Image (spheres, rainbow, N blue to C red):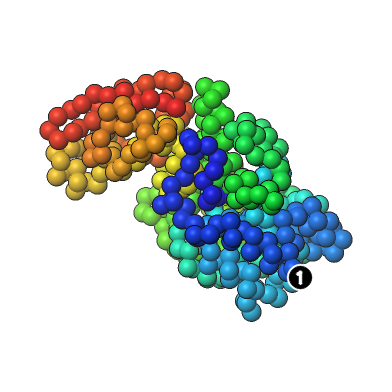
Amino acid sequence: MKAFHLLLPALLVPLALAETVKDREGAVRADKARMEADKRWAYNDIESGFRQARLTGRPLLVVMRCVPCMSCMGLDTAVLMEGEQISPLLDQFVCVRVINANAIDLTRFQFDYDLSFSTLFFNGDGTVYGRYGSWSHQKNSADQTLAGYKQALEAVLAIHRGYPANKPALAGKQPGPVEYVNPVDMPKLAERYTRELNWDGKVVQSCVHCHMIGDAMRASYRDRKQPVPDEWVYPMPAPETLGLTLAADQAATVQAVTAGGLADQAGVKAGDEVVSFAGQPLVSTADFAWVLHRSGDSARHEMVVRRDGGEKKLILDLPSGWRKATDISGRVGTWSMRGMAAGGLNLVDLTDEERLQRGLGMDGMALWVKGLGMYGMHAAAKKAGFQKEDVLVEVAGMRQRMSESRLHGHLMQEHRQGEKVPVKVRRGDSTVELLLPMQ
């Protein structure tokens, strides 16, 4: 689903971004042998899960897992071990484990495709109850903490008990319209993959990884010379985009609020338990991110928080362009954007101290070339004359201070494949003018 790096040379992901086990093929086959005999988990069979949910009246839990990926390995192991924390809760679900994205129904399965472990919760009739995904587990493969997952399971069961009377409150959780029903319908993926895994051959090489969905969507827009929509440049924005951090061990409890941020302006305080956001009951941080993902260029949302034993309604205003503050630098999907928009440049906005040391102002662009690619589309910047340690001070006439993430968004939306964008870089004491190819 995520870490096999086999889409196309242009979309390859370096191991540094998605470290995998040494024997990937063996890991996938061992997982299949173990899980097909497991009494709790239905293996790679979503439709049987929906049938069982309808027959039993239990909610459906679908885990999307990239088996060889080190990221989230601790969480995956903890969930499968079914410790005392969650085993009684899992007994109340129909549980399905899916290890590849080849044939998933994108009209149903919309979540954070850059994660190595995600969970979607459904009613048997297909209604989405919520989503779970953890960036703390993604970053720390040894993290086996189940507190947040347990909270999500409990929250989903509460929603299920209130269904269908609470169905109107779940409307915003439902998937949006999509251009392609299955990943293998996408041109870049249809060229190489089929709906089924090749268990008789090299199964790993036949697998569509979840991050490839975003990669292929962005490539389809670029190939058609169309701007890439915000939702594919800045998918599933983190709460930090609004200036708040949610505790990893809770469903949706505010751990910290950044002074002056959008959340602070709305009156959110550390310790607030977010009961609902945009009318939607939350089961995890991923649900919070889903509300942001489905928000437009500007929006106004009601947030209900539990504080000091009572509930308080807050209004969160998202101004035009709010999403461009999202930091996407740590996402696997950003690797393909570095090739498309930046020719393989890995850019870092210099700190104020670093700017002073280099004689650069605080408000202007100063994107330091931390590294640059050497192969395929990621070698385009190097071939165009860019060098490691260069500092970009002007791109396409823009000179204002910005992050790599914001620059990617601008180039993916305002400049088309085949263009060459003028760039000025500081190299030592000199200013060099170069042309950055858009791909």
- Tally the numbered discs: 1
Q: Quadrant of the C terminus?
A: top left
Asked which quadrant contains residue 116, the reply is bottom right
Instruction: Tell which residue pokes out farthest to the front in this image.
Output: 201
Which of 204 and 290 lies nearest the eye of the viewer?
204
Instruction: Tell which residue pokes out farthest to the right in this image.
Output: 55
The percent position of residue 263, horizontal first and vertical second, equals: 45, 51
Which of 293 and 262 lies nearest the eye of the viewer?
293
Tell me: 383 left or right of 411: left
Residue at (31% x, 26% y) in the render: 384
Q: Residues within 10 Å of mark 1 (few under 14, many from 20)?
A: few
Q: Note whether residue 439 is visible.
A: yes
Instruction: Tell which residue pokes out farthest to the top in this image.
Output: 419
The percent position of residue 405, horizontal first and vertical second, equals: 40, 40
Q: Is residue 238 above or below residue 284?
A: above
Residue at (51% x, 27% y) in the render: 222
Q: Note whether residue 344 is visible.
A: no
Q: Is residue 184 above or below residue 308?
A: above
Residue at (52% x, 51% y) in the render: 3
The percent position of residue 242, horizontal first and vertical second, equals: 45, 49
Which of 117 and 311 lies nearest the eye of the viewer?
117
Q: Amino acid at mark 1?
A: Lys
Asked which quadrant contains residue 367, the reply is top left
Q: Is residue 110 above or below residue 223?
A: below
Which residue has dot 1 on it?
39
- Disc 1, SS: loop
Residue at (69% x, 40% y) in the render: 194
The percent position of residue 34, horizontal first and vertical second, equals: 68, 67
Tell me: 2 left or right of 393: right
